[in-house]
Amino acid sequence: LMIGDCRCKVTTGLGTGSFGTVWAAECLEGGPGQEVAIKEILCQTSMELANAKFEGKLLEMIQSHARACGSSCRPNVGREAYALGGRDPLDRIPDLVGIETEICGEEEWRVQLAMTRVPGISLDRFLGTRCHRLGGSYCGGSSILGSSTWVRQSGRQCFTEACGLARDLILQLS
């Protein structure tokens, strides 16, 4: 599988969500020389296509900013050690390795984003753990992101839980 200049061999699935499927892949040549994550997004409107391409552009802009600021976030240079040590928050954001867009039909595209793989757990698992900790007050169904049923609660309680969730997600970057 070629994505940009990177030739990859998909090894396993990492997760699926409303934005696509993410695969682990071995970078065989032309990339960072380590495992990468490939996000595959199926787009059925030109707006979805623009959003998928924007995600790649956003990763490029963050990389560029990190290099300009002297961050440890540099492709191909000891990222894994920094990400595991949590020294620089930008090390928790993947670097874009390549992007490919394939036309699958009329008004249908497949966008593949190859990026450095950052250690961590899937959002589904993160939310499942949080849900379990909170006693399942807003969880249900087999997938946290797919078929969850939010139980009606007072406005104040929902707001408090939403702020707590936002805080926990932000702390994942630090």
Image (cartoon, rainbow, N blue to C red):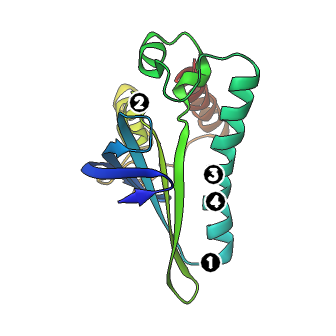
**161 lies left or right of 127:** right
How far across and how far down the image is residue 65, in percent?
Answer: 74, 29
Q: Which labelled disc corresponds to residue 45?
A: 1
Distance Cα–Cα, label 1 vs label 3: 16 Å
Task: Indicate which disc, 4 or 2, sits on the residue closer to the N terminus.
Answer: 4
**77 lies left or right of 59:** left
The mark lying in front, picked from 4 and 1, is 4
How far across and how far down the image is residue 157, in percent?
Answer: 60, 33
Task: Quickly name the residue at label 4.
Answer: 53
Task: Indicate which disc, 4 or 1, sits on the residue closer to the N terminus.
Answer: 1
**Residue found at the far bottom of this picture:** 106
Distance Cα–Cα, label 4 vs label 2: 31 Å
Amino acid type, callout 4: Lys
Mark 2: few/some/many CA within 10 Å (<14, 14-19, 20+): some
Mark 4: few/some/many CA within 10 Å (<14, 14-19, 20+): some
Image position of 165 with respect to 15: above or below:
above
Q: Secondary structure at mark 4?
A: helix
Tag 4–tag 2 contact (CB < 8 Å): no
The mark lying in front, picked from 2 and 1, is 1
Distance Cα–Cα, label 2 vs label 1: 34 Å
Q: Is residue 83 visible?
A: yes
Tag 1–tag 3 contact (CB < 8 Å): no
Q: Which labelled disc corresponds to residue 130?
A: 2
